[in-house]
Amino acid sequence: MVIRRPSGETPILANSIPSLRFRKPGYSSGQGQNFVEVADLPTGSAAVRDSERPGAGHLTFSAAEWSALLRADEHT
């Protein structure tokens, strides 16, 4: 899967990084709730996948996108 960035950033081929280490958020209760898992990419970007379907692939976010998402989450 290649994610093309409109901002001109280099696309990240997340499938080509076999050693991704996904982690669940610290607030994951593990009691039947749906969560995502996150893996840090070498460029400061992040890969995100569904914790219930880890084999279904993942989305990648650039470092700027990931930071903006985390900042927005702080305000919700």
Image (tube, grey):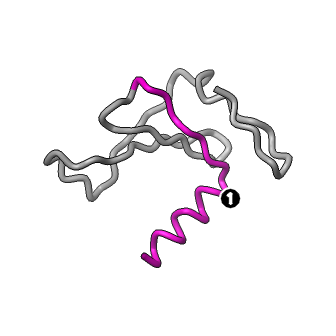
| The C terminus lies in quadrant | bottom left
- Residue beneath the point at 33% across and 46% down: 24
The N terminus, quarter of image: top right
For the residue pair 57 and 44, the one nearer the viewer reads as 57
- SS of the residue at dot 1? helix
**Camera-side residue: 38 or 36?**
36
Q: Residue furthest right?
A: 8
**Residue shown at the point (38%, 45%) measured from the top left:** 36
Residue pushed farthest left? 31
Q: Is residue 41 left or right of residue 9?
A: left
Decide if residue 34 is on the left or right side of residue 71: left
Q: Main secondary structure of the magenta part?
A: helix
Residue highlighted by disc 1? 64
Q: Quadrant of residue 52?
A: top left
Picture coordinates of residue 25, whole percent (x, y): 34, 52
Q: Position of residue 42 (x, y in %)?
A: 63, 39
Image position of 7 (left or right of 13): right
Report the magenta residues as a range. 55-76
Left or right of residue 67: residue 26: left
Crowd rating for badge 1 (residues with CA inside 10 Å; few <14, some 14–19, many 20+):
few
Q: 26 or 2, which is in the foreground?
A: 2
How many marks do you count on the picture?
1
* Residue at 62% over, 21% down: 16
**Amino acid type, callout 1:** Ala
Residue 61 point in image, percent of width and height? 62, 47
Above or below for 33 versus 56: below
Q: Is residue 32 magenta?
A: no
Where in the figure is residue 64, as x and y percent of width and height? 68, 58
